[in-house]
Structure formats: structure tokens, C-alpha cells
Image: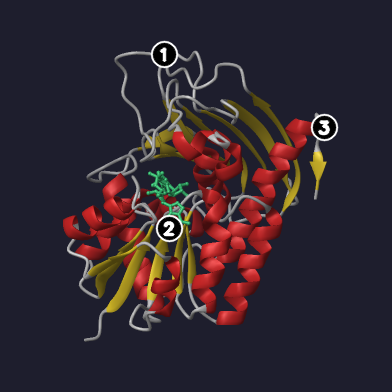
Amino acid sequence: MRKVKVAVIGAGSISDMHMQSYQNNEKAELYAVVDFNEERAKEKAEKFNARTYYCRLEDVFANEEIDAVSICTWNNTHAEISIAALNAGKHVLLEKPLSTSVESALEIEEAVKRSGKVLQVGFVRRYDTNAQLLKQFIDAGDLGDIYYAKASCLRRLGNPGGWFADKERSGGGPLIDLGVHVIDLCWYLMGCPKVKTVSGNTYNKLGNRANVKNLSFYKAADYDPGKNTVEDLANAIIRFENGASLMVDVSYTLHAKKEELSVKLYGDKGGAEVEPQLSIVTEKHDTILNVSPQIDKLSFDFKQGFQNEIDHFISSVLGEKETLSPVQDGVEMMKILCGIYESAQQGREIEY
Ligand SMILES: NC(=O)c1ccc[n+]([C@@H]2O[C@H](COP(=O)([O-])OP(=O)(O)OC[C@H]3O[C@@H](n4cnc5c(N)ncnc54)[C@H](O)[C@@H]3O)[C@@H](O)[C@H]2O)c1
């Protein structure tokens, strides 16, 4: 069997999850690790037994042996790198968010159509075992018509620093970084309804709080506590054309008592929580029931989520499956995220 040869571009913090998952997939071969930081590319290539490493993207695109790339670089490079990869005939797994603007997102979509290659957006939470389990219940009609969803991802100390804190390279703060996951998960489980309006607020009150001691958090490979140009809190209400609505709040830092991750959906036949624990709420014989699925892990399994995502990508490249997170969903998500930033900046609701 010929294995799918993959190059992982961007050898920072999240790339480990990609490389490890390719290593575990018997239909894939981690062929190359790529980073303009040579030391980092070399070190990761050795650690994950890649055949080689590169510092120049042209070398990856020129290598005809490479079938696919995983792009794990700064958000502002996603469009340029993915379009160049598609133009070179490579399949692409692109980390979230798709890009940093609607215009560049649409350019990626055009490049996907032109190339005929697979592009999977790194909406890892869609590939979570629990999300897929709940989707089965939703598709079977157990929640009925989902008309309201609510998601929070509140870090009290969690600005990853480096490029994440630099709006030029990230496109924004917790909204584009964390909000993208929870908004997308709700939207996906609601059946991807068309967006009608968004109204949002962003706040830049607390900075990155690099002064806080004795509490650890996720950091970019080039963590730099000095500079911060992104919001530290965002909230929004999103209205859909089918009348459903979604409320969300996300933070890098907030004077909250503890971290919070919650994803909740409410329908006319039942409700569900994906986070902090999977559970389903229903009614039977005039009684409200909280149903607790008897499964190994009731919340998101980071490692398994990435493994599922990468296994699905490889199957899509081999033509065995359709990706669960196609480029057009990445474009819609960019419209929502950019709409929220625009609404916050203008202090009014945005209509689509
Ligand atoms: N799915 C998830 O849960 C998840 C979690 C964290 C990060 N991410 C996404 O993954 C991407 C990377 O995040 P990270 O935390 O690994 O960042 P990071 O800063 O740790 O790593 C990024 C790496 O990319 C390299 N790089 C940047 N531009 C490059 C270019 N043009 N050519 C070659 N190398 C380049 C940098 O040198 C660095 O090593 C981001 O888009 C982020 O949003 C996703």
C-alpha cells in the first residue's frame, strides 16, 4: 500500500499533535517537517522520525513525492501557504482559523475549487468522539429543532503571547483563537444555519497579565510577554435566518474565579451539553430526564480529537470519506468572526 506522504509546515506548539497523529496512522508517512526556524524543524523531524526537514516552503511545494501538508503556522500566513500548496497539487489540512479576513478566506475557497484537492479546516472539535456521538442523536431528531445555543470559553490567565498577542499576525485575540472552536461546534451541531445578524463587544482591559506568578498556561513557541495588541474578552449574539440564536463569550484573561468551558444546545424536544460534560436532557412521561451517556470520557479528549481529525483527513485524501470540515464552512466562520469584530468596532449590529 502506498502511504500518503505528509509535510507538517510550522513546527511550533500544536504541530506535535499533528505529527504524533500522522505517526499513528498506518496509511500516512510523516515525510518532512518545515519551519523557517531551522533548529526547530530539525529537532521535530528527529523527534517524530520524519525523513527530512526544510526551511523553505518552495522546497516542499517542488517535491513531487509530498502528497499533502498540514499547515500549523501563524494565522496571517494561512491563506498564502494554503493557496501555494493547493496550486502545487498538495492536499491541505489547515489549522483554524481559515485565515484572518473574509477576502482571503474566499481566495482559499477559489484555490480549492481550481485545484480539485481536499482542504480540511482544523475544526478539531467536530472530530471529537462526543461531538460525533451527540450529532447522531441530533440527526435522529432527539433534540428536535435547535433554537438556542450558548458557549463560553473563559480563560482567567491564558494569553499565549508571541504572534497570538500580535493582531497583525493573529487577526485578533480570544475570539478568533478560542471563539472559533466553540462557535463552530455550536453552529455545526445546529446544522450550519445561515447567519442573519451578529452583534458583538470586545474589551481590552487587562492586557496579558504577564505579571501573574505561579499559574501555568498554553504558550506559543516564541512566547514573548512584552507586546499585546489583541482583545482580552469578546462576547456576541448571533442570529440565524431560521430564527435560532447563539450567545458566546470568550476570554484570554478575566477576573473570573475559575476557567470555564461550556457548550450547550437547546431544542424543542430536548437539550444537550457537550462541555463541561456530555449530557442530554429530555422529557418522558411528564418527567424531565438528564441522560448521562456511559462512555469512557465525558469531555473533550485533546489527543483523540486530533487523532480522529488526522485519520479523517488521510481517509479524505484517499477518497474513502468526505471531510467533515470543508473550506466553505471555514469561510462562513470567517464571516461570523469578522462580523463580530466589525460590530464591536462600530458599536452596532451587522446584517448579512
Ligand atoms: N486546533 C487547535 O486546538 C489549535 C491549538 C493551538 C493552535 N492552533 C493553531 O495552529 C497554528 C499554530 O499555532 P501554535 O500554537 O503551534 O503556534 P507556534 O507559534 O507555537 O508555532 C508556529 C510555528 O510556525 C512557524 N512559522 C510561522 N510562519 C511560518 C512560515 N511562513 N513558514 C515556516 N514556518 C512558519 C513559526 O516559526 C513557529 O515555529 C495557529 O493557526 C493556531 O491558531 C490550533
Q: CA distance from mark 3 to mark 1?
A: 34 Å
Residue 150 seen by the camera = no
Picture coordinates of residue 184, whole percent (x, y): 54, 48
Is residue 168 or residue 244 the one in the foreground? 168
Circle 3 — which element? Answer: loop
Q: Residues within 10 Å of mark 2 (few under 14, many from 20)?
A: few
Q: Is residue 150 left or right of residue 52?
A: right
Q: Quadrant of residue 109?
A: bottom right
Looking at the picture, the colour scheme in use is secondary structure
Q: Under tag 2, what secondary structure? A: helix
Q: Is label 3's Cβ within 8 Å of ligand 1?
A: no
- Asked if residue 326 is positioned above or below residue 11 in the image, the reply reads below
Residue corresponding to mark 1: 211
Give the percent coordinates (x, y) of residue 244.
68, 44
Which one is in front in this view, the residue at disc 3 or the one at disc 2?
3
Q: Position of residue 74 (x, y in %)?
A: 49, 49
Q: Amino acid at mark 2?
A: Gln
Secondary structure beneath label 1: loop
Q: Residue at x 70, y 38 (%)?
A: 341
- Left or right: where does residue 123 sit relative to residue 149? left
Instruction: Kindly identify which residue carries mark 2.
Output: 136
Amino acid carrying mark 1 in the image = Asn
Residue topped by disc 3: 348
Residue contact between numbered discs 3 and 2, judged by CB atoms under 8 Å: no
Q: Which residue lies at the image location 25% right of the left edge and 46% below the top edge?
A: 295
Pick the residue in front: 268 or 100. Answer: 100
Q: Residues within 10 Å of mark 1 (few under 14, many from 20)?
A: few
**Measured from the top left, where is residue 11 in percent x and y?**
34, 53
Residue beneath the point at 58% across and 56% down = 191
Q: CA distance from mark 1 to mark 2?
A: 45 Å
